Amino acid sequence: MNEHKKIWLDLELREDIDDFATLIHALENNVNISEISIHNPSKSELILACETLKRFGKNIPLIVSGQLTIYPDGKDINPSLFKYFDEAGVIEYVELSAYLSLKPTFEDKIVFCGGSLYTLSKLVEFNDGEFLEAFIQGGFAGESVVGSENVLKKFRKREAVPTWNLNIDVDATDRVLLAKNVSCHFVSKNICHASWVKNSDVAGNSSVFCEVVGHYFTENSSDKKCMHDLVAFLSIFNDTLVKFKPVRMHRTTDERPKWHSVITPDSNHFISYSLDYEMFIKLVTKA
């Protein structure tokens, strides 16, 4: 499934390390990443991205949507990642509008969203009716969609909850959901919140991914980490890892919207309903 497609990787590298872990896993496993974009990045995020690309010898365009942003202490990159970049490092990037002026093609390409849907909404607009395919970390489907066997304890008896990435920029999310030229696969809370990687999973493994995650465990005196973005990313390539159902996603009009899904057979939107956890661990620890 999608093994040979190009991937536009849209991430945010702040606070939570799962975006950076996804980037490392993709580069280390030579996934065909054609672009990397960050919305409203900090200088530290851009340095981290550039240094990481240099480490793996990759010449992949780094694209900025929005603007360079200064974040308060504790809201920029995770302190465990300081060892992976030099503050004086060279930053090379192109602004999204300038990159799109080069008329990139989206045939045989999938857009992966690990943050807000702002960049994806701009790509949908740019394509002006041309088909786009996207995998998105976010959304929610309750028991009526995923079944009682796949509902995590904290989401029992809940059919609608807020979901972070979709709520960062609700207008952008609405534009994507209303667009007719984009097929979206959402890896939602009952699945991505089950994607735990433990210290014992990565200990003694020589891969760069396991070294990065192991260092996080050491720095944070932790023994496990939920890898929301990574499981969503891996679902692109493994159609038995995460399974999907066609749905329409709806939201409330609250200041902090709650999202819910309704099974809709003819929809071009799909949401996750099951996870093969053993396969997930095998995939993330494979050098």
Image (cartoon, helix red, strand yellow):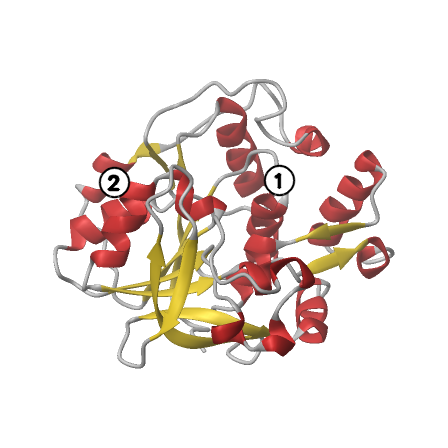
Residue that mark 1 sits on = 16
Q: Is residue 114 above or below residue 62?
A: below
Q: Are marks 2 and 1 in contact (CB under 8 Å)?
A: no
- Sooner in the amino-acid sequence: mark 2 or mark 1: 1
Q: Secondary structure at mark 1?
A: loop
What residue type is disc 1 on? Asp
The image shows residue 259, relative to residue 240, as above or below, that is above
The 10 Å Cα crowd at callout 2, few under 14, some 14 to 19, many 20 or more, is: some
- Left/right placement of residue 254 relative to residue 230 reads left
Count residues near mark 1 (Cα–Cα under 10 Å), then give few for <14, some for 14-19, many for 20+.
Answer: some
User: How far across and down, in percent of the image, does residue 27 sit?
Assistant: 56, 54
In front: 87, or 96?
Answer: 96
Counting the numbered discs, the total is: 2
Vertical arrangement, residue 49 with respect to residue 204, above or below: above
Residue at (55% x, 23% y) in the render = 89
Residue at screen point 52% across, 31% down: 45
- Residue 268: quadrant of the picture: bottom left
Does any portion of residue 184 appear in the rendered image? yes
Image quarter where the N terminus lies is bottom left
Q: Nearer the viewer, residue 239 or 263?
A: 263
- The residue drawn where x is 42% and y is 55% is 259
Q: Position of residue 219 (x, y in %)?
A: 81, 34
Provide the residue designation for mark 2: 99
Q: In the depicted view, which residue is nearer to us: 95 or 117?
A: 117
Q: Amino acid at mark 2?
A: Tyr
Whole-percent x, y for residue 176 in the image: 27, 54
